Each structure stands twice: as C-alpha cells, then as structure tokens.
Amino acid sequence: MKFLLFITGIWLYAAQTQTLNYIGMSKQDIIKVMGKSNPGFDLDEGAVNKTYKYLKFVDKYNEETWLFFLADDDICIRTKLISDFSNQKIRTDELNKKYKKAGENKWEFTEKGITYIVELNKEEWFFTIVTKEKK
C-alpha cells in the first residue's frame, strides 16, 4: 500500500510540472510561478553560461533539470526539461493527455493565437522535452 501511494505521489508530482506555458513570461514571473506550481524544483543560481541566458531549476531528486531560455529582455523564448529515462513514460503520457499529437515524439498546442511545438528527444543517457514557438 505504501508503494502504491509513493508511485501515485510521484505521478501527481510529475503531472504538475509541465502544466504551464512559460514562454512569454518574464524572468521574475518564472521564478515566482515555479516556486508555487512546482515546489519540487529549486532555482540553481550557480549555473553560469556565457553563450545562453537562462534560468535553471533542478528537482529535489536530481532526476530532472528545467531550463528557461531568455531573450535579452529577460522574457522566456524556449524551455527544455532534461530528465532521467525513468520518467519517460510519465512524461509521454502527460504530453499525450495535454497536447495534440503532431508526429513521432512531437505535440502541438495553441495559446493566445500562438502555436507551440513540444518535442521529446531521446539522448544516450537522458531525454529532453523542448517547448518553443512553432515557426
């Protein structure tokens, strides 16, 4: 019974993390919203990258990292969730439930007249989910 509750808790935790579209949000709004809607993720302010401007959040289990890429005006233009393969089924089920299928490992959704593409990419040791405006 405890195991079932544990699995249910993980599923509910995972299901809440990709519910919002952060594209178009300001840096400060992302920090506020992530703190409220995804309390299992902590802002990692130690990340420094001179090529990209982004916010980095890491989950408390060190299984997932969420990057929010920012334009020069600190507005989010793309997100990337990097995750351990142990979360792939949960994440894929979540994407299938929330978005319209647009191909193999691709989904689409429209919000405020803008269409977004969501892509799941399998790497050697992990997978990523990238959300960006469809061009």
Image (cartoon, rainbow, N blue to C red):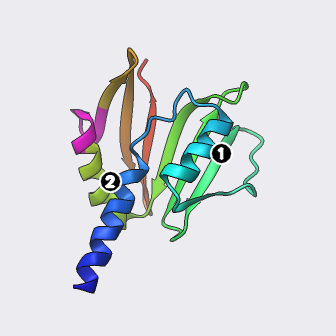
115 in relation to 9, above or below: above
| Residue that carries the numbered disc 1 in the rendered image | 55
Residue 125's spot in the image, x, y percent?
A: 44, 63
Q: Is residue 18 left or right of residue 94?
A: right
Taking the spot 37% from the left edge, 58% from the top edge, the residue there is 14
Q: Secondary structure at mark 2?
A: helix
Locate residue 128, reporting x and y percent.
Answer: 44, 50
Residue 73 screen position, x and y as percent: 72, 24
Q: The residue under label 2 is which amino acid type?
A: Arg
Above or below: residue 133 compared with residue 31: above
Q: Which quadrant of the view contains residue 113? A: top left
Q: Which residue lies at the image location 32% right of the left edge and 28% below the top edge?
A: 109
Element under disc 1: strand
Q: Position of residue 26 (x, y in %)?
A: 64, 31
Q: What is the number of the mark on residue 73? A: none
Find residue 124 and report its image quarter. Answer: bottom left
Magenta-colored span:
96-107
Q: Earlier in the sequence, mark 2 or mark 1?
A: 1
Classify mark 1: residues with Cα within 10 Å, few (<14), some (14-19) or many (20+): many
Q: Which residue is mark 2?
A: 91
